[in-house]
Image (cartoon, coloured by chain):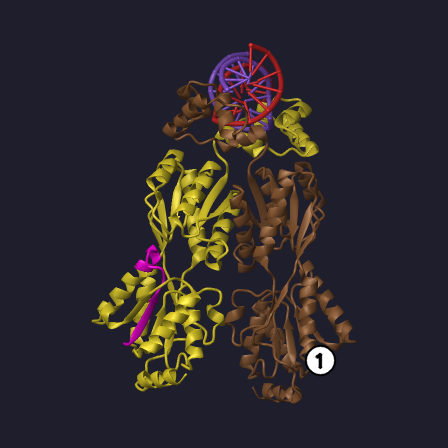
Chain colours: A brown, B yellow, C red, D purple
DNA sequence: ATGAAAGCGCTAACAG
DNA sequence: CTGTTAGCGCTTTCAT
């Protein structure tokens, strides 16, 4: 590979001149510029980013930790980050934390060690003091996105789980539902707790509380939705609507209802959360709360780039609103609804 | 940040000794080792990867270009790469090519410039000579995965689109279907053409050819599936089965059938391709050909790491078999099937 | 077993 | 406007 030295020799100038031309700063004569540009083209010269980074202490790489790239939810988020970073000529170093504290720590350290210029972190666990110290020493901008609101972050982009769940529960209540089940995901996740808070508020508005609904917590898996639904049906408790912690859980609910001969939404309405890829494709198509993950990713990246460019820039926390997407799976509560599905469920 | 010099001073040894200890090679006395390790711990020293990379000409970073991270298909593939790379302490620099030649070129150059130790490329377009030259100069191992079989690659991991489509079409034929539609995706993609080849072979086995089926090409979008289905229905051509170019197209087909009062699979069977996230959740659940993208990603990463470790290692091309996943959307052809849906379709 | 020294490729004062 | 100089932090001969 040609180095800056080769270029300078070929162009008959000094390395500094070449450097200036590449960086586009400083005064350079047209003569020199042309000679250098010609030499660069002839030699196929490309600056060595390692050397440049070592010298300038900047890598033009930003690091991202998400829970799991393989999941469409985070993949979309990463897609959002990427579109912004690409426009700014930054690359993305990607790591997954798999919602486990030690993997998250490993991921953060990996990115720090690769001298990222800044970090976007979607974490599900609190960060240990040890990691915090390393991160603090690195002294690079960090934006937290969703998940655990880590104190590491210079700025936060949150998805409004609270208001999303609030709106969702309100919607069910508005549709006349009073006998409601909520299947919460993993309780240790910050997002889960936020959603529960929103649900509390909505219930309180209707003069109700968690005690008035059927609440079960598990994890964000289709299987949990399936089994929780079976338990609900078996319990004999009659609900007219189920609010699923997310669309995966919702898919499981739908499957269980079908297997037990309960028609959705005629007998039980179902509300999801996330607006995942499959939500539109379920039958009935899932009414759900959209989390605009791509927007969140974009926003986080933009914030980070701004902070990298101007380290005095201290943005406000940004909350991306969740949005109710009305499809087919929630219908108004009707008078005759409460009893007949119990009969059918028993039969099935 | 503490440097190797700080550590050496604190431990009362030379920088070389510290370096040896970190690298774990060379002879070092226990005394020195202990002193250095203590100093490293006290100082919270972390090696600077830029400096190390500059010197050693290795970054421990591997670059990946996929069509689009935001799509679950590629996200899963990246997930596979990541799981392998993480185990080997390599990081992944990720770029998307968006199936456009110039974006793919940009992505490749970006990764080369960031001094990746190797590249995994999922491309949809041929690579220009210009880019080829740069890549050749970089002289790093490259494995191509799926998509366009670029000549850049030192090794290839392919998904067996040919046999997947072959098996799929065979399956439809075995189920007694003879009046079949195939909705192909983007014809310019290598994968698409491979699938068509497989279909040709299957048809030939049954003494048929493309002329005997209803073939339409478009793109890998739900919308195309929807519209192609409408056109098919409107044409009056009677088919007992539709083979969709992928599951997204398949979702569109299903939607159009439903809107036009055609029951699937009773009146028309539907076969997908990919086994995307939503395939299981469609109603009827989609019988489809699974592309094991995560395995492909893992395999590609493993191959690449092996080639990085031993540059004389020249692996065979690996083809990951596709697999028929039987669900509900394909049923055997029945005698009465061919006419009634035409009637209903007209009515709708 | 350890240290000295050279240099990876680049940037940024500084002096001219 | 341009060249000289001095490193960035690390690895790696080469002596000792």
Query: From what the image shows, is residue B14 above or below residue B111?
Result: above
Identify the residue at the far left of this view.
B207
Q: Would residue A97 be seen by someone viewing this image from the given angle?
A: no
Front in this rendered view, residue B281 or A49: A49
Query: From what the image shows, is residue B344 above or below residue B107?
Result: below
- Residue B133 pos. (x, y %): 35, 36
Quarter of the N terminus of chain B within the rendering:
top right
Asked whether, in this view, residue A201 is left or right of residue A2, the answer is right
Q: Would residue B132 be seen by someone viewing this image from the given angle?
A: yes
The segment highlighted magenta reads: B178-193
Report the residue at 39% width, 43% height from top.
Answer: B142
SS at circle 1? loop
From the image, tell me which residue sits under label 1: A178
Query: From what the image shows, is residue A275 above or below residue B311?
Result: below
Asked if residue B43 is among those painted magenta in the image, a careful observer would answer: no
- Residue A221 pos. (x, y %): 58, 66
**Mark 1 residue crowding within 10 angstroms, few (<14) / some (14–19) / many (20+):** some
């Amino acid at each position: 590979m040609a180095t800056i030295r080769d270029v300078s020799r070929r162009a008959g100038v000094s390395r500094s001149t070449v450097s200036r031309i590449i960086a586009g700063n400083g005064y350079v004569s047209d003569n020199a510029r042309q000679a250098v540009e010609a030499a660069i083209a002839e030699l196929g010269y490309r600056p060595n980013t390692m050397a440049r980074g070592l010298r300038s202490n900047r890598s033009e790489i930003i690091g991202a930790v998400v829970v799991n790239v393989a999941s469409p939810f985070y993949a979309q988020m990463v897609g959002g980050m990427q579109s912004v970073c690409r426009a700014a000529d930054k690359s993305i170093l990607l790591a997954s934390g798999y919602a486990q504290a030690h993997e998250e720590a490993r991921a953060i350290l990996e990115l720090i060690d690769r001298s990222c210029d800044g970090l976007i972190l979607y974490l599900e666990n609190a960060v240990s003091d040890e990691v915090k110290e390393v991160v603090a020493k690195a002294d690079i901008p960090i934006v937290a996105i969703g998940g655990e609101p880590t104190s590491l972050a210079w700025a936060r982009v949150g998805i409004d789980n609270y208001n999303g769940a609030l709106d969702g529960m309100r919607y069910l209540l508005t549709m006349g539902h009073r006998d409601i089940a909520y299947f919460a995901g993993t309780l240790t996740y910050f997002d889960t707790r936020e959603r529960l808070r929103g649900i509390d508020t909505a219930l309180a508005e209707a003069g109700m509380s968690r005690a008035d609904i059927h609440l079960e917590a598990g994890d964000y898996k289709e299987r949990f939705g399936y089994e929780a639904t079976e338990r609900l049906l078996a319990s004999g408790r009659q609900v007219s609507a189920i609010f699923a912690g997310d669309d995966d859980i919702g898919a499981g609910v739908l499957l269980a209802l079908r297997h037990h001969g309960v028609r959705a939404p005629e007998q039980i309405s179902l509300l999801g959360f996330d607006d995942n890829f499959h939500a539109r494709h379920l039958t009935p198509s899932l009414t759900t709360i959209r989390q605009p993950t791509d927007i969140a990713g974009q926003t986080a990246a933009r914030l980070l780039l701004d902070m990298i460019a101007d380290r005095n820039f201290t943005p406000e926390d940004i909350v991306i609103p969740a949005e109710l997407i009305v499809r087919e799976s929630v219908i108004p509560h009707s008078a005759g609804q409460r009893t007949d599905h119990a009969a059918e469920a028993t039969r099935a």
